Amino acid sequence: SPGRRALLALVRRSRHREVPLRDLQGGKAPPGARLGVPFLLHDLLGAQQLQSVPTASGPLLRLAES
């Protein structure tokens, strides 16, 4: 889906290819993410395209090594 691709592209462009979960939740949805960021995050984590890494300052989303 376009929203899925947009979210993955956002993580891919970020430093170290990882983004704090709260940055994604607080930011506005990328264009094409009509289903909403929480749904897309759940979807990408479930499809194992993103990994959630626990840190002291909250979860960090990282591109899954393919």
Image (tube, rainbow, N blue to C red):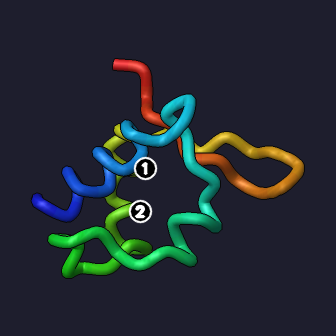
Local packing at callout 2 (Cα closer than 10 Å; few below 14, some 14-19, many 20+) is few
Mark 1 residue type: Leu
Q: Mark 2 and mark 1 in contact (Cβ < 8 Å)?
A: yes
Q: Residue at x 56, y 29 (%)?
A: 16
Mark 2 residue type: His
Which percent across, then down, holds residue 58?
77, 57
Question: The residue tagged with tag 1: helix, strand or loop?
Answer: helix
Q: CA distance from mark 1 to mark 2?
A: 5 Å
Q: Residue at x 49, y 74 (%)?
A: 27
Residue 20 drawn above or below residue 33: above
Quadrant for residue 63, please give it. Answer: top left
Residue sitting at the far left: 1
Which percent across, then down, holds residue 20?
63, 54
Residue sitting at the far right: 56
Numbered marks: total:
2
Quadrant for residue 21, please give it. Answer: bottom right
Residue 62 drawn above or below residue 7: above
Q: Residue at x 11, y 59 (%)?
A: 1
Residue 62 drawn above or below residue 28: above
State the residue position of label 2: 42
Image-based side of 58 in relation to 33, left or right: right
Local packing at callout 1 (Cα closer than 10 Å; few below 14, some 14-19, many 20+) is some
State the residue position of label 1: 45
Quadrant in which the C terminus is drawn: top left
Which percent across, then down, holds residue 9?
29, 45
Image-based side of 31 in relation to 19, left or right: left
Which percent across, then down, holds residue 36?
32, 79
Question: The residue tagged with tag 2: helix, strand or loop?
Answer: helix
Q: Residue at x 42, y 45 (%)?
A: 11
Image-based side of 34 in relation to 22, left or right: left
Residue 9 numbered mark, or none: none
